[in-house]
Amino acid sequence: MRPREAGIRAQALLADGTPVHDFLVRETARQLHVADAPSPAATSALPIGAMIVERLLQAPPAAPAA
């Protein structure tokens, strides 16, 4: 192995500048966003999917679109 340069990845920050060290989930009445899913997201895809399904099952039914 040979020394290499350090890698760079995006890092989510909260409004006060605090780094987000885990998945950041934001919800509205009709949307759910998983943000800051770094490279381990591939290994966490099934738990993230399970969390999304659990939240959807707990949510009240959406009103039909007009």
Image (cartoon, rainbow, N blue to C red):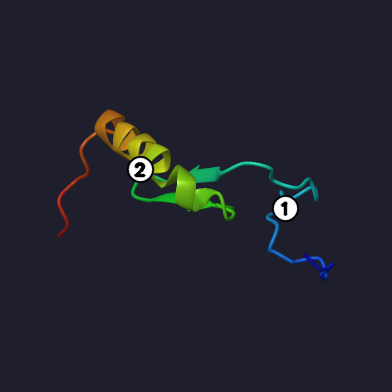
Does 55 sit above or below residue 39?
Answer: above
Q: Which residue is mark 2?
A: 49
Q: Earlier in the sequence, mark 2 or mark 1?
A: 1
Q: Is residue 24 left or right of residue 8?
A: left
Does 24 sit above or below residue 59?
Answer: below
Q: Quadrant of residue 12?
A: bottom right
Q: Quadrant of the C terminus?
A: bottom left
The x and y percentages for residue 32 are 40, 48
Question: Is the residue under label 1 in contact with that under label 2 (CB below 8 Å)?
Answer: no
Q: Residue at x 35, y 43 (%)?
A: 49
The three-letter code of the residue at mark 2 reads Gly
Q: Residue at x 71, y 48 (%)?
A: 14
Depth check: give the residue in front, 36 or 60: 36
- Secondary structure beneath dot 1 equals loop
- Secondary structure beneath dot 2 equals helix
The x and y percentages for residue 65 are 17, 57
